[in-house]
Image (cartoon, helix red, strand yellow):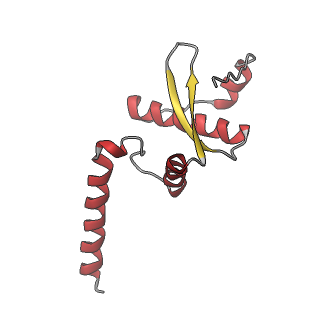
């Protein structure tokens, strides 16, 4: 396959991916999904992952999706990733100092609704 054919093939794949990501059925897929993001979403559909709603102190909330085998460390990383993504998409590039916010947050709680 020549360079031109590879370029056209890559361009075609990019157009197909863009069309798929604009489909309302795939609204929960991030703009630039990683393989891990896709695997987790597939796991959610198959029952091997869970959707966790995080309620913030300002009464807003957001969801993170984790595999059923996830640890608290995985949850923390998923929350950081989601918060950073939301901040960047709404306000452009920003940096949150998690070490400062971690030391300020002396109150922690986990609630379960079953």
Image label count? 0
Q: Position of residue 14 (x, y in %)?
A: 30, 61
Residue in the image at 41% along x and 50% along y: 32
Q: Write down the quadrant of residue 17 in the picture.
A: bottom left
Residue in the image at 57% along x and 47% along y: 47
Q: Residue furthest bottom?
A: 1
Q: Residue furthest top?
A: 58
| Placement of 73 over or under 10, stated as above or below | above
Placement of the N terminus among the 4 image quadrants: bottom left
| Placement of 40 over or under 98, stated as above or below | below
Q: Is residue 48 left or right of residue 107?
A: left
Q: Position of residue 51 (x, y in %)?
A: 55, 36
| Placement of 18 over or under 70, stated as above or below | below
Q: Position of residue 106 (x, y in %)?
A: 75, 17
Q: Is residue 107 left or right of residue 13?
A: right
Q: Is residue 4 left or right of residue 108?
A: left
Q: Write down the quadrant of residue 88 in the picture.
A: top left
Residue 51 vs residue 60, the one in the foreground:
51
Q: Write down the quadrant of residue 49 in the picture.
A: top right
């Amino acid at each position: 396959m020549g360079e031109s054919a590879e370029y056209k093939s890559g361009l075609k794949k990019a157009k197909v991916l863009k069309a798929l990501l604009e489909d309302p059925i795939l609204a929960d897929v991030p703009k630039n999904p990683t393989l891990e993001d896709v695997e987790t979403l597939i796991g959610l559909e198959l029952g091997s992952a869970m959707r966790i709603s995080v309620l913030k102190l300002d009464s807003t909330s957001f969801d993170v999706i984790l595999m059923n085998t996830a640890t608290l460390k995985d949850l923390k990383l998923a929350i950081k990733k989601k918060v950073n993504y939301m901040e960047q998409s709404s306000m452009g590039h920003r940096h949150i100092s998690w070490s400062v916010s971690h030391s300020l947050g002396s109150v922690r709680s986990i609630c379960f609704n079953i």
